[in-house]
Image (spheres, rainbow, N blue to C red):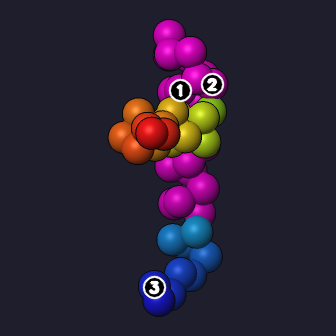
Amino acid sequence: MIAMDATHAAYVAIAVAAASEIIAISPLKANSIIQLVLQFLRLAFPKR
């Protein structure tokens, strides 16, 4: 496992928050990281 100290956790939190804000102002239909990931997974692995 990767050990994370407080500094790395802060960097990850800032990156996630920045990505969330960028997605919120983008013209995409999805408005969250989770929705984009789920949409990608549905496209990559469609039901038969």
In this view, the mark in front (2 or 3) = 2
Q: What element carries label 1?
A: helix
Name the residue carrying label 3.
2
Q: Are marks 2 and 1 in contact (CB under 8 Å)?
A: yes
Q: Is residue 26 rendered magenta in the image?
A: yes
Q: Which residue lies furthest to the front in this view?
A: 48
* Res 6 label: none
- Residue 7 to residue 19: above or below: below
What SS does tag 2 mark? loop
Picture coordinates of residue 20, whole percent (x, y): 59, 35
Magenta part of the protein: which range?
10-31
Q: Residue 18 sits in which quadrant? A: top right
Which amino acid, mark 2?
Answer: Asn
The residue that appears at 50% across and 16% down in the rendered structure is 28
Amino acid found under the numbered disc labelled 3: Ile
Q: Which of marks 3 and 1 is nearer the N terminus?
A: 3
- Image coordinates for residue 29, horizontal then vertical, percent: 56, 15
